[in-house]
Each structure stands twice: as C-alpha cells, then as structure tokens.
Amino acid sequence: MLMLMLVAAVTMWLRPLVTAQLCRSRTVRTGKVFNVIQDVQGDRLYFQPTTTRLIKHPCEKNIALYLGKQVFFTMDNFETSLLPFTIPTSMQVGVPEVTSAHFAGSLLLLVVDQKVYIYDYENNSWSMSLGIKHPVTHVSGDNCCYTGSLFCVHVSNLVFAYFRGDQISQTHIYYSNTGGFSFWKYHYDRQAEIIGSLGGIFHFFSLSQVAMLVVNQGKGMFKYSDHPLNRSFGLSFDYNGTLDILIAPGQRGILLLWFENSLLFSHNAGQLVDTVRVKKGDQTLFSSIFEANITIHSIAVTENELAVITREDNLYYGNLGIVPSSIIKFADQYIWSEEVALMFRNPGTLEILTPVRDTAFPAFDFQKCLVNIQALLMDPELHVGKCKIEVLTGEFIYRMYTIDMHSQLELTASLIPQPGTSLIPLVMVSNPHSLGFQATFYENGYTSDGNTKYKLDIFLKQQQHWGRTDSNFTSSLKRATMSTLTVDIANKEISCVDIKPLSTLISVGCDLDKKIVIQNKVTACSMGILDPLALQDNYSFIIEKEFYHPGFQGQQSSEDLHVFYSYQQLGCPLLVYYDTLWKPVVELWRKDSFQEVIDAEYVLLEVNGQFSYSYSLTAQSAMCTSQPQNWTTMIKEFGGPFFWNRENYVSCHDPNNNAPLRWPDVQYQILGGQTANQIIFGHNGFYVFYISIVDPYYSYCQLETIFSIYVYGAFPVQLVSAGVVILLIISSILGSVWLAYKTPKLLRTARGRRIKKCATQLCRRCKTVCQFRASATARAGTEPPGRHRTPHGGRSEH
C-alpha cells in the first residue's frame, strides 16, 4: 500500500514536468559576429495596443509580420535574428505607429500615421498609396489566396482602407483593385442612411459580397452589398470593446472577432455570430470568454484550428468546426510575456514566438516554443474523447472547379469510421445563394480488417436551377459568383487534429475551356472559287469607298480601303450567295470537343466597317416591346466597336426594359434566340465579321471570335443611272430605224452609187492582202512574237 502511494505521488509530481517538456523551446540566434554590428536604418515602426499580432501571408507560409512594441518582418518564418522593421526617413511618416497591416500578393500594406504605405518585399522598395485624401486607420481584404496541394493562387486583389470608429453616414471609404497602389472612393449602397459607427469593411470572396460591420449602442451587425443579403442586416450581437476581425484562411467565410475580453465566431461571414465557449471534455464550463474572466493576449488561426494565449499564462485550443466553436484549456505553461505571439506551423503544430532583446546587438533573437497539440490532447485530465474517424478523403480536396451556366458537377468523398462508431457527415457551401447541391450517403463495402466503408456522392449545380428556392434567397443569375464546398463530420472530436475537413473552391462562372467556332462545311476554297495557296501568299483585296466607313457609321468613306487577308487567323472564307438570307451556324466547343449548336442571341459586326448588308427583320417584325439596342447606339455609348457583350446587352423582349419603342422600322441587329432574323448581302466580295454571344443566360464567358465569308453572284455595280441607260437604248433603236429607212434611198442616187463602188473595191483589196499573208505564214511554219491568251483566258509574257 505504501508502495502504491509512493508511485502515485511520484506520478503527480512528474506530471507538470512531462507537460512542460511537450513545449520544446529553442532560441534562434544567427548572423551575430563581434566587430560587425548592423545599424538600424530609418524610423522604427511600433504597434500601440497591449496585445500582439502575428500576420501570416495567406500564400507564402514563410512570410509573416509581427506587431508589438517592436515590428518584425520575416521571409523565413523567424529562423534568423532580425533588426526591427523600419520605414525610410525619406517617406516622412511623422509618427511611425502601425495601426493595421495586410498582405496583398507580393506587397505588404501598412497604415502608418493614418496613411497607407506599400512595402514591396520582393524588390525591397517603399511607396505610398495614391488616391486616399482622408485619414485612415485600417486596411482590410479577403485572404486572397487559395492554396492547394500543388498550387497557390491569388484570387482577389480587392483592398479597403477606412477610418474605424467614424460615423458611417459621414465616413470616407476607399477601395483598391490594384493591390493597394491606387485607391478610389467606395460608395456603399444607401451609406448616408446607415446609423452607427464603422467597425470594419471586408470582402468575402467565397460569398461574392462586401460586408460592413455597423456598431450602434453596444450592438454589432453586418450589412452586405449585393442581393439577396443586402435586403437586411445580419443578426445583431454584443459588441464589447473594439473588436479586431480575422478572416480564417480557406475561403469558407469563417470569421473570428476578438478583443481582450471577447471572442466571437461566425461560419457564414457574419450573418450569424456566436460566442466561443470554454469546455472541458463534453462539458461547457463557460458560455463566453468574458464569463470565464479570460484576458486574451494573442490568437492564431488556420483553416480549422484556433489557439489563444492569455495574460493569465494559459494556452487554449479549439477547432473551427460546424457546431458552435469552443476551446479547451491546456495545463499551465509559464510562457506568457508582453511580447509573446502565436502561429501555427502545420496542422496540430503550434509555435509560441517571443522576441528576445540582445544587449550587445541591435538585432533581436527569437525564442520558439513548439507545441505538439496531439500530444497535449492525450492528457486524460482534459477528458477529450477518442477520434471516431479513421479515414476522411476526397479527390476534390484543394482543387478548383467551374460550374458555368446550366452546367453541373459531381464530387465524391469516402469515409471510414472507427469500429463500433458512427459518423454524421455534413456538406456545406459558403454561398448557398448561388450554389445548390444534393448529397447521398451510403455503405460502399468493407476494409480488409472488416470496417465499413461509406461513400458520399455530391451533385452540384446553380441554386436557381434546382427550382426549390425563392427568388428572394438566390443571387442574380446573370452575376458570376464564388463558393467553397466543405465536407466535415458533425460529431467530430477535438482530438481529430489530423482529420481536416475536405474543402474545394468552386467558381459559378466562366468555363475558360469553352470557345465558339463557326461551322464551315462549304467554303470558297472547297467550291473552287478561291485558291487557298493564293490566300496564304500575302493576299489582299480592295473595299470600295462607297461600301465602308472607318468609324462604323454606315456612311460613304473618302477613299478605298486596302485590306490584307490573314489566312492563318481566318482560313478559307465561307461561301455565301448574295441574294440568299443567311446567318452563321455557331458551335460551342470545350477544349477539342464539340458540345452543341448555339441558339442563343448574338451580334455581328464587319470589322472593316462595311455596311453593304442588311437585316431581314425590323424592331416591329421582331416583336420588340421596347427599343432594341444596335451597333450605332452601342458604339456611341462605349466610345468604340466590339464592346457589345453579355454584360451590357438588354433584350427588347424583356418586360423589365422600359425603353419605349419609338422607331419600330429600325433594323433589328440581333441574331439567334427567339427570332428568325437573318442577313442579306448587297454585293460580292470579302466580309470579315466579329461575333459576340450577348445572351446573358447562355454562359458567363465572353464568347466571341472573328470569321470571314465570301459573297458571290451579284451583278456588277452600275456606273450610270438607270434613266441614262434607258435613254441611250431608246436613242439607239430610233437611230437604227432611221438608218434602215434612209439607207435604201441614198443608194439609189448618183452619190450613193459612187459610195457603193468604192466599198466594193476596198473589200477586194483586203481579201487579196489576207490571202498573201496566209500563204507566207504557211511557208515559214512559225508564229510571230508578242502576247497571247493563256488557256484560262489571261495573258502571259514570252
């Protein structure tokens, strides 16, 4: 009995030591050689709040910015000693206090002394953002990077700059789509009517929304920019202190809002905001950080994990799951200091970072304490349940997919639970307003050791095409959007550190592999009218000035146009008979595979400005209820040709189009769709057409191309008017009748007989000369030199 008590006592005494050893500390100290001391150049930057921030680059995992009493910028994850981060004195920043920072591609944006500065770390250069004319305190943007197993893509450059705490009705908000180089004023919808102060403004790429945090009388709520979320605010929540907002990586719309005594969580971009609970095992100890009397000093977040270090010298850990988020407390670590900060190195691996001042050198060292989360969770005092998941996998993880208009996508996931357990799979999309799905979960065989395998089939398409949602819920069908798809387990334990949710990015937009091709079964080359070899040999043709205008105004030009024919781009032109109603057969191809013949609405424009063709329908005969668009009005509105597309097309059959039908006899210049409109040509020759699919509901792509046709069969153009021709014919007939009447009378007179005798003698002499020359040629047997006609009727030189 004494022995058992002794063993128990030793075990209890060793437990803190074992726990402490799970955090392995080391100090990074590099590049310090005596008699070689680096000077700090420029103005030292600093961060005023009592808490610390560690901002990691969303794509480049080794690039990060530490904000505290000192500011440090690293490109090797703090694996070298660093000088404090400075800004050149030439920038004349005044007070070098940093209030906000944001990574945008290869740029680091810093708000210093209420201005936005840009640090290009690849070129080690500084500049100041242009266009901001009022003080700002913060910059923000989406975590504009999607990281896959084999790629890392920057998917958004939208950045906002604003003054946090200003009244929204009076504040000035700026946006940049150039990564921060230039900013423009951002006008939020009905901004002047919003009552409250500005808590922040953010771009949620995976929701295709801009969200503004409105703070009023101790409550916070989000206001959104686009339909359907712009119809109302998100649900309100308690707003204590001044909350910083973190957008978790992964484009899933996960938000963390935190202050020293508050930690809130949202899994749908702020529409619903809840407190993060403090738990022990399955038991909830406190419903909020404030209730637990915790003072947060620094936090770290990944796509799925959350870590918090407090001034009470405690470390908390949680996951960002589907169910309400919670954290658990680890054993005391004695690692807190005013400079300490957190960051995740890998899933389940947390690093506690502390800058260490060196009295002999200006460069700071870094103490790193590496925490193995999985090892800590095995502590039986935490009462953490065993992970029930053996396998959760899917081929779609970290890939990007596209669903174009009327397209669909099928994905599958595989699950294997631990023996004797059951799993509850959950499928989520970050933007249900544009992307809908249907999932099927079923048994799919057994593993070699007898475990049941399950399969999850997910069928996705546009939410509007499921036919089961109200129009007030869905986003605009014409507008391309983004969404993420996430597969997770609803009853997943916090101990499943290595079992990450399956996530992929889906673009409800243009499929870049799509293109249009004009069917060319009958060409001028295949019918022998044109020679393909001649077309490839710098072939050119002339467009007469009567039939084209360089400004596409349908008026006669001042001179003929000499056009070179690009055979490499156009190939052999289609063959069209001039007096036949015609329209092209437009085909949709995806990569090298034919998809369908397009029957959507499209427009044509002759690229050289020719106007010697017309349309078979008018606005009235096309049954338009409003004035249709045409090339003249579109060129005038947009300042040039080739800008008529799906983005600006408005159908004259749209009941919401309020443009009155004032000119019903104007030509209807849209082909395809519900009308039988066609083109008729007025003269022979080459036409090179630009074609654009303008139907906004056919594809999100700007489908366009150019092609050529050759028109034949038209009569030559008359050089004189028809009246002159008729007058000449009538005069010729009357002249012939007069000569037939006068000639017999004239031959009966003496003068007539002399003229007849002379004509007879002249004929005899001509006959004699011709006979002599024929006999001479026969004797010589040769042909006189000179020119002659080729068998094809042309001329060639000898």
Image: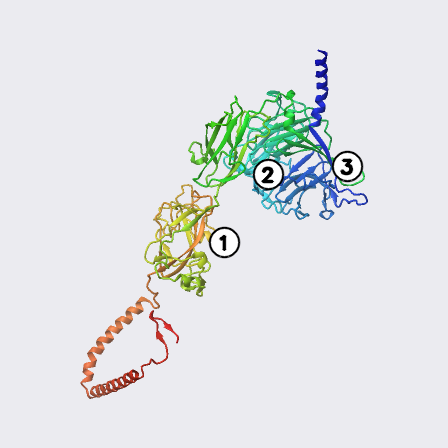
Tell me the crowding category of disc 2: few under 14, some 14 to 19, or many 20 or more residues within 10 angstroms, Cα based: many
73 or 136, nearer to the observer: 73
**How many marks overall?**
3
Dot 1: element: loop
Q: Position of residue 315 (x, y in %)?
A: 67, 27
Mark 1 and mark 3: Cα distance apart in space = 62 Å
Closer to the camera: disc 2 or disc 3?
A: 3
Disc 2 residue type?
Asn
Closer to the camera: disc 1 or disc 3?
A: 3
Earlier sequence position, callout 2 versus callout 3: 2
Q: Quadrant of the N terminus?
A: top right
Disc 1 residue type?
Gly
Q: Position of residue 426 (x, y in %)?
A: 51, 28
Look at the image and tell me whether residue 332 can be seen. no
229 or 11, nearer to the observer: 11
Q: Is residue 435 left or right of residue 784?
A: right
Q: Position of residue 154 (x, y in %)?
A: 58, 42
Mark 2 and mark 3: Cα distance apart in space = 32 Å
Closer to the camera: disc 1 or disc 2?
A: 2
Residue placed under numbered mark 2 in the picture: 143
Look at the image and tell me whether residue 419 can be seen. yes
Residue placed under numbered mark 3 in the picture: 357
Q: Is residue 679 left or right of residue 735?
A: right
Residue placed under numbered mark 1 in the picture: 639
